[in-house]
Amino acid sequence: MEEPVVQEPRPASPCPSQARDRRPLVVAVANQKGGVGKTTTAVNLAAALAGAGRRVLLIDLDPQANATSGLGVQAGQGASVYQALTGDGSAAESIVSTAVNGLDLLPSELDLAGAEIEVARMDEYLHRFRRVLEPVLAVRGYDFVIVDCPPSLGILTMNALAAADKVLVPMQCEYYALEGLSVITDLIKRLRDSGANPVLELQGILMTMYDSRTNLAAEVVKDVSAHFPQHVYRVMIPRNVKLSEAPSFGKPVTVHDPQSAGAEAYRLLAREFLRREEGAVAPEQVKPVLRSAEEVARALERVEIESRANRGRAKRFRIFRIKVTPEQVSPDPGAPVVEGGLPAEPLQPSGN
């Protein structure tokens, strides 16, 4: 097995000579329920946005530091936002570059867990992170700031929501996740109505770990779309082995395996994200992909599957696509479509 790539922290990439025309958009990736693909989404969306030519800062606000290790950064003690939150340092000093061009990282560390207690004792504790972030937004020239929140509704998550412009909610395609969705959306409304963050909006709901082979996943997507028709992303993130193994190599999936279904899905997510926020499609080389196994079958010229007889040996899949016109595909009438008349959801992986 290939050894994980661990990158030592180094200074962030220099600021562009020309200042940005607008303030960076701060997006908190939040869901108090764990295991929904929150950190996976924060890391890979940030990498995909950087790949589309945007300057992105990813802030790891989770003491578990999974986003930090997922980008191959091994941060030492004091290399997080913890010191700045407690009034003993500057967040800008802790920002480092990553192996992804255009993507910087503000790492996390285990000591950040102590901020849950210390910050709660301070004056205006709900706006500590906002004050820490303001100098970074003013001088760094980022297009987007993505904040990976802890899987809880503690002080750190509340601070992130109080400082963010919008909230992206990853949601697993299971019914337990529906209960958590109502909690986070109600919290957004309360923060906005109370004046703690009057501009806070729900940026979108991203369905993750989607498996087209199960009726449950389709039912959950249908229910969420019925309640939040304007917020559910058309792109759904499939279950994918490469998404799961990429963090062990210290790379986003778009770098670890650019041709995988997971990488393709997050590039499509970045396109839709930019379409929402900038009103234009990002310059991508990725073509629209198909929604289900049945639709994929119509678009395959041939499928060759070679498997080893010995148990435990990996199967190898080779899939060849042909060009498909809108007339050749009859998608679900209720499925949203993108350019070319094809549904926006990613190809479901067969085994990679």
Image (tube, grey):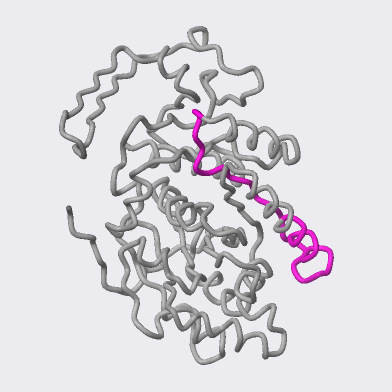
Foreground of the two, 310 or 217: 310
Q: What residue appears at the point 60 percent right and 77 percent down from the top-left corner?
A: 129
Q: Which residue lies furthest to the top in this view?
A: 327
Foreground of the two, 173 or 252: 173
Looking at the picture, does residue 91 appear above or below residue 188?
below
Looking at the picture, does residue 69 appear above or below residue 236?
below
Q: Range of the magenta residues?
A: 185-213
* Magenta stretch: includes residue 189: yes
Q: Which residue lies furthest to the right in this view?
A: 193
252 to the left or right of 112:
left
Question: If the image is split into quadrants, where does the C terminus sit?
Answer: top left
Q: Residue 135: where, in percent of width, then height?
A: 55, 77
Q: Residue 247: where, in percent of width, then height?
A: 34, 57
Q: Residue 257: where, in percent of width, then height?
A: 29, 43
Foreground of the two, 100 or 36: 36
Count of labels in the image: 0
Q: Residue 2: where, in percent of width, then height?
A: 17, 54
191 to the left or right of 140:
right
Q: What residue appears at the point 74 percent right and 60 percent down from the top-left corner?
A: 188
Looking at the picture, does residue 211 appear above or below residue 93?
above
Report which quarter residue 276 is drawn in.
top right
175 to the left or right of 17:
right
Q: What residue appears at the point 53 percent right and 85 percent down from the top-left corner?
A: 114
* Magenta stretch: includes residue 254: no
Q: What residue appears at the point 24 percent right and 19 percent down from the top-left corner?
A: 304
Q: Residue furthest front?
A: 311
